[in-house]
Image: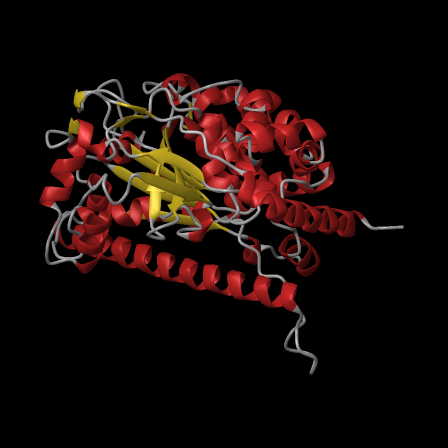
Amino acid sequence: MLTQRYRIGFRLMTLVIVALLLQGCALYRIQNNPVEGMTDPLQGYRLMHPQRDYGDVLLLLSFSGGGTRAAAFSYGALKTLRDTSIGEGADKWRLLDEVDLISSVSGGSFTAAYYGLHGDGIFHDYENRFLKQSIQGALIRKLFNPVIWTRTLFTGFDRTEMAVEYYDTYIFGGATFADIFHHDRPYIEINATDLSSGQRFSFTQRYFDLICSDLQNFPLARAVTASSAVPIVFPTVVLKNYSSGCDPTDTPTWKMLDEAPTASPAALALTRNLRTYRDEGSRSYIHLVDGGISDNLGLRAITDHFALVGLDTQDEDPFSQFETVAILLINAETKPKRGIDDRLSKPGVRKTLDAVSSAQIALYNQETLATLHRYIEKINERNERVTGGKKVYFIEINFQEIASPRLRDRFNALPTSLALNAGEIDELVVTANRLLRQEPEFQELVEHLSKKR
């Protein structure tokens, strides 16, 4: 009898084979609309929206990639923040209510988008609607439906469109970015990878300004699909570049590019890449794939901001308007035992490809974390010297912090798929809660906020 893991692997391999056979048949649907004339800096899904009051506490969350594993782990963290109370009596409030921004990639984008759309509603139906469903199995069944083959051959309905349709129907209910309320929900930054440049592409109006497109009516399901579209298995999500049809020079986006510090290599590289979107002639279409390729931690949205405000070259506090700042990384990265180094025989194609891709992502993750730590250290050193102690808290939970070797090994062996059983989901949620509550920096943050109030 085939084990569950073998069946999942067999189905996934079959999916890849069928995907490759149908690769040449697909046409692409364009669903981003142009804006006419000059883009409005006060309209659209923007971080600095006039309806949004960020208060004196800035809490930024980052949800990593990792399929349902990452979605469940980040969901567990949200539950912990919901159940963490600050203050007493009438002044009691939830730490979850202080969350201002969630940056996400791949599997983490399902949780981020769902919470941005439903708020506390996520705690009522998300497990049954997504986490404890075999989404991968449902997509595979649809792929082998002859009706899908017909649509693929004659209407341009490809595997990516199939995923978009499924997510839109069964998870996000046809919602667009206009359905995420600015005034009482965190800002959700869903990230994909620009296949041409290899750089992060964010589903925010800031990026859509550059291609003169309107994000408001763009489906959440399509953004999440782009963020989690594993290359080859899923064709790219495609955006039309309308940059010749509007003037973005008065938008916050263009002002940011013009004011980026020229002495910072990181800022120069980032702005150079962003400016390419203004060349509609050579970049008529933007092809997007899994956000985990360019940033599997979801942290680049934060480090890019630091680079663009000149933190590499200036001695300033980019969070000067806030009394308390905390960055919380929910990292579902795995470090499985591959068994390559303990035998003479050469690894096969599957193990080699898996090791190569995982090693590159792991190295990039290390670089991202090192960059963020460098920025935070610089801010904290400056604040200690100038203001006498205000600090930026950085909190990370990951599988390597699990005390039990057996549980740690089991989590590190979880696949990056959209199919985990209910027991595994429950274990991930409980473990996220335990790790976060035990994290010393998290305990310090809670104590600090309690005293401040």
**Quick one: which residue is furthest to the bottom in this view?**
344
Kindly identify the residue that appears in the image at 34 percent across and 61 percent down. 370
| Quarter of the image with the C terminus in it | top left
Percent of width and height locating residue 359: 50, 65
Q: Quadrant of residue 49?
A: top left
**Left or right of 336, for residue 164:** left
**Left or right of 297, for residue 153:** right
Percent of width and height locating residue 105: 45, 42
Which residue occupies the foreground of this view, 163 or 415?
Answer: 163
Which residue occupies the foreground of this view, 421 or 197?
Answer: 197
Kindly identify the residue that appears in the image at 37 percent across and 48 percent down. 299
Colour scheme of this structure image? secondary structure
Indicate whether 258 appears above or below 398: above
Indicate whether 242 appears above or below 305: above
Residue 338 is at least partly visible in this image: no
Percent of width and height locating residue 179: 40, 17
**Quick one: which residue is furthest to the front in this view?**
154
Kindly identify the residue that appears in the image at 62 percent across and 29 percent down. 130
Percent of width and height locating residue 103: 39, 39
Kindly identify the residue that appears in the image at 63 percent across and 40 percent down. 418
Residue 217 is at least partly visible in this image: yes
Count of marks placed on residues: 0
**Quick one: which residue is furthest to the right in this view?**
1
**Left or right of 165, for residue 286:** left
